[in-house]
Amino acid sequence: MASALVVFATITGNNEDVADIVTEAFEDLNVDVEEVEITQADPSDFEGVDICVVCPYTYDEGALPEEGLDFYEDLQEMDLDGKIYGVAGSGDTFYLDDYNVAVDKFAAAFDKTGATRGADPVKIDLEPDTDDIKTLTKFVGNLVAKAGTVD
C-alpha cells in the first residue's frame, strides 16, 4: 500500500479544509495517509512516505506562513529523490500578484529536493467549494497515478 503525508498550515481554517479534502481523497484510493499541522511536522517525515503534500497559506503580501518558515528552509536541504510531491493551498485573490504565492514557493522548494512533481499545484480562492473539491480529488488522483500506486 502506498503512503502519503499531508502537512498543512492555516490561520482561517481554509487550508485545514484543503488538507482534509486531500487526505480523504487519498483514503478513498486506499493510500495510507497521515495529516499533520506544520508545527508538528519535520521535512524528514517525508522520507518515510511515497507521496509528500504541503498545503500552505500565503500571508499578507506574499509571505510564507511564519510558523512554517523553518519547515520551508529545512525542506530545501532534503534529498527526496524517488518521492512524489504536490502542493495545494488556499489564498485570497484580493492580494492580486501575491495570490497564493506560498504554493509556488513550496513547489520550488520541493524541486530542490529531487522529488518528482506528481500534479500541478492547486490554488484555491478562500474556502474550498464543490468545484475545488473536484479539483483537489483530481490532484490526488494524479499524485497516486504518478506514484504508480492506483489499486
Image (cartoon, rainbow, N blue to C red):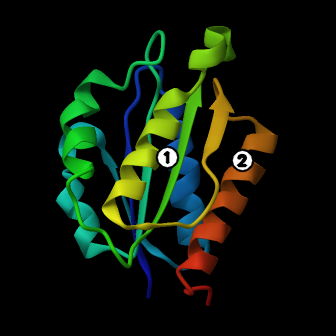
- Whether residue 1 sits left or right of residue 46 in the image: it is right
User: The residue tagged with tag 2: helix, strand or loop?
Assistant: helix
Type of amino acid at the residue the image marks with label 2: Ile
Tell me the residue at 22%/60% (across/down).
Answer: 78
For residue 149, say whether it is visible.
Answer: yes
Counting from the top left corner in percent of width and height, residue 75 is at 26, 50
Q: Position of residue 101 (x, y in %)?
A: 52, 28
Of helix, strand and loop, which one carries label 1? helix
**Is residue 6 something one can see in this rendering?**
no
Mark 2 Cα-neighbour bin, 10 Å: few <14, some 14–19, many ≥20: some
Residue 118, position as x, y percentages in the image? 57, 67
Which residue is located at x 37 percent, y 34 percent?
9
Instruction: Say left or right for 32 vs 143.
Output: left
Q: Quadrant of residue 56?
A: top left
Q: Quadrant of residue 119?
A: bottom right
Within the image, what quadrant is residue 52 found in?
A: bottom left
Report the residue at 66% width, 13% height from top.
96
Point out residue 112 in the picture as x, y percentages from the top left corner.
Answer: 35, 56
Q: Nearer the viewer, residue 106 or 23?
A: 106
Residue at horizontal 67 percent and vertical 52 percent from the top: 136
Image quadrant occupied by the C terminus: bottom right
In the displayed structure, 124 sits above or below 148; it is above
Q: Which residue is mark 1?
A: 19
Instruction: Name the residue beneath numbered marker 2.
Output: 133
Mark 1: amino acid: Ala
Q: Is residue 50 above or below residue 139?
A: below
Q: Is residue 115 above or below residue 35?
A: below
**Left or right position of 70 against 118:** left
